[in-house]
Amino acid sequence: MFEPDSPETAPPAQTWSHEAPRMQAFVARHRPFFTLVGVLVAQLLLLSFQITRNHNVRLIQVWAVAVFDPFERCLHDLFENSSRAWGTYRSLWRAHQQNQELHAQLLVARSQLQQLSEQAGETQRLRALLELKTHLPLQSVAAEVIATSPGESGNAIFIDKGTDLGLVPDLAVVTPDGVVGKIIAVFPHTSQVLLITDASSGVGCLLEKSRIQGVLKGAGRNWSQLHYVMNEENVAVGEAVVTSGLDQVYPKGLPVGTVIKTDEGNIYKTIAVKPAAALNRLESVLVVLKPSLQEQQATNLPARP
C-alpha cells in the first residue's frame, strides 16, 4: 500500500536538510584547523605588503604579477592574433575586390583590343583592295561577302552588290591575293559568284614562267586542276599560275594559284593547283567591270603623231 510518510517517497529537499547538519558538524569539529589556515593566510598577506624585493617592489606585487601574468599574456596574444587575423581578412577582401575590378578591366581591354585588331585587319584589307583597284586596267566595284553556299560541296558565294550598280553575269571577281570566280546570277541588290574550285567553272590560264597555256577547272572545295597541258611539257611544282585573258572574262596577268602536284596522264598532264585566294575566308572582293563600247573603241584608236 502507498504510505505517505515512507522514506522512499520523501522529497529531495529533506535529503538536503539531512546533509546540512553533517556539514555544520564537520566545520565545527575542524574549526581550529580552519582558523589556523585563515591566520596563516592573513599573516602571509601582511608580510607580502611589508616585505620588499629589488627596486622596492612589494612581494604582493611580485605574486600578483606571477599569478596574473600568464593570463595577461594569453589575452594580449589573443588580442594581437585577432587583430592580425582581422587585418588579414580585410586585406584579402580588399585584394579580392581589386582582383574583380582588374578582371573586369582586363575583359574590357581585351574586347577593345579585339575590336581594334578587327578594325586594323579590315583597314588592311580595304587598303589592299584600293591598291588593286588602282592598278587594275578596268573599272571595278568593291563588294562584301554576305553568304556562302551551304554544305561541304558548296562552291559559290553571295555578295551585296547587284543590278543596282550595273552588275551583269560573267564579270570577274577578284581579291588582292588572286582570282575568286565569276558572277553567274544577278539580283537587284545581290549577286551569286561561282568559285574557281567549282567543277563547272573554267578559267583561261598560263604558267607564269614557261608561258604554257591551259584551262583551270574546279576539282574540290580547296583546289583546282589545270587541264590541256601536254605530257611533254615541263611543269615544275611551285610554279605560279596566272590568267591568260583568252576567256574574255578575267583580265590577263591576275594570280590564280600555285602548282602543288603534277602527274602524267594518257595525253595531258594532271596538274593540281592550289588557289592563291583564301576562298574559305572571303570578306571583301572586287568585281571587275567590262569596258563599254566607247572605251573599247577609244582603246583601239591609233595614237596621234
Image (cartoon, helix red, strand yellow):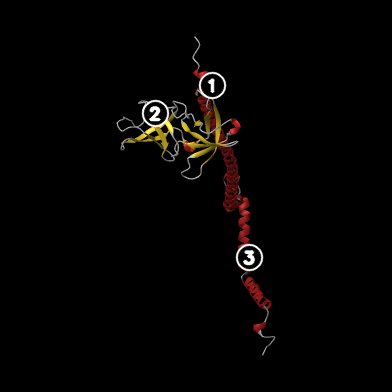
Q: Which residue carries the number 1 mark?
A: 295
Residue 91 relative to residue 257: left or right: right
Q: Height in image: 295 above or below 239? A: above
Secondary element under disc 2, as helix, strand or loop, is: strand
> Circle 3 is placed at which residue position?
35
Tell me the residue at 62%/66% (across/down): 34
Q: Is residue 127 left or right of residue 23?
A: left
Return the residue found at the far bottom. Answer: 1
Q: Nearer the viewer, mark 3 or mark 1?
A: 1
The three-letter amino acid code for the residue at tag 3 is: Thr
| Quadrant in the picture for the N terminus | bottom right
Q: Is residue 44 above or below residue 175?
A: below
For the point 60% across and 67% down, which residue is it? 33
The type of residue carrying mark 1 is Glu
**Mark nearer the N terminus (3 vs 1):** 3
Disc 3 and disc 1 in contact, CB within 8 angstroms: no
Question: What residue is rendered at 53% in x and 30% in y?
Answer: 287
Residue 25 lies left or right of residue 172; in this view the side is right
In three-dimensional space, the C-alpha distance between marks 3 and 2, rounded to whole angstroms, equals 131 Å
Sooner in the amino-acid sequence: mark 1 or mark 2: 2
Q: Amino acid at mark 2?
A: Leu
Q: Secondary structure at mark 3?
A: helix
- For label 2, the residue is 206
What is the quadrant of residue 235 in the picture?
top left
- Sequence order check: which comes first, mark 3 or mark 2? 3
